[in-house]
Image (spheres, rainbow, N blue to C red):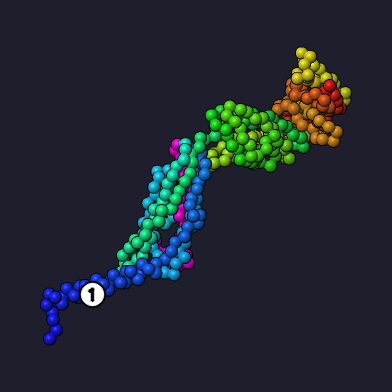
Amino acid sequence: MRDTGPQATRWLRVFLFLAFTGIAASTAHAQGKFVFSPAAANFGNVEIGSSKTIQVIIKNIGSTSAVLTRENVVGDMYTARGFTPPKAIPPGTSVVMSITFEPTKTGSVPGSVILGSGVSFFGRDITNALINYSLSGTGVPAATLDATPINVAFGSVPVGTSISKSVQLMNYGTKTAMIASASVSGACFSTTGLTMPMALPAGSTKSFTLKFAPTGTGTDSGTITLKTFFGGSGLTLNMSGTGIKATGKISPPPTGTGGSPATQGGSPATRSVALSWDASTSSNVVGYYVYRATSTGTPYAILVNSPISGLNYTDATVQPGQTYTYVVTAVNSAGEESAHSGSATAVIP
């Protein structure tokens, strides 16, 4: 006769418990194994007010499917996104977790992402291990860069010539600004005088040159962007200029435009060249452009942003030991420009 009393029921419960425990233990033993790339997220230095994101690949290198059962971020300057737990990861496949560090203060900032690793058992996700993925980063002061001028207007420049302007970059912060790169947009614009990467100490300045060389008529615009290390926003300067046509429809100033070295105050540091010329014989002339070349065969660069209404000009940007050649053109009310005048050469002692 089969015993169906309380004793038999208790044995049945024990048997079922052992059976289910054995299944769970077997599943846990055969679970997947996660590996992370990179092994830890080190953000390095990041400027306050900016952010940096690292893509972390989580791969199941085990033989069976595994589940990421939970995700908790430790550290209020870190955020994580990319998947929503629970997330089943078949063997040999991976998911991407994007972790962002956005510092709000200076100094080292530790953190971590705690992930639950487990299995799915009869529709229920069971966590059998916790993974602590390490995060580290350092908040650094934002670069405090400025420039004078911040908007560089080159004015009207005849096609085939160029004009250059000096810009002063300054760091008005309390920390050294680490500048990673300088990029120029706009085909007619270029820069010289900046060697990247560069360090600009707090309170110091650096001068560099921007150049506009129009290849056609019309208005051109561009930018130069200085990017700092550590994810900062850096600094962007705007540039603009207008290319105008150079024609021979109006008469240039007569040949023999004068140019002679003249010193101001007797100091070599204040040497200058005084230029003068006779008026063009054409009507509707509104002014004159002055050009300078620094050696034979080099193109002339315009020295003024807009036409000069008078018949003289002083070049105070000359350097000792240099030889300069000058020409002048006339401009009429339609913006048309004459051919070059006769040249004048000045040798600076």
Residue for badge 1: 15
Identify which residue is drawn at 53% across, 29% down. Answer: 174
Q: Is residue 288 left or right of residue 169?
A: right
Q: Judge whether residue 288 can be spotted in this image.
A: no
Residue 102 part of the magenta-drawn span = yes
Q: Nearer the viewer, residue 299 or 135?
A: 135
Q: Is residue 189 left or right of residue 18?
A: right
Q: Position of residue 301 (x, y in %)?
A: 77, 32
Corner quadrant of residue 295: top right
Residue 124 in the image, given as x and y percentages of width and height = 31, 65
199 and 147: which one is in front?
199
**293 is higher (above) or lower (below) than 61:** above
Residue 161 in view, yes or no: yes
Instruction: Magenta stretch: give its range.
Output: 87-105
Looking at numbered disc 1 in the image, what kind of residue is underneath it? Phe
Compared to residue 321, the image places residue 47 above or below, namely below
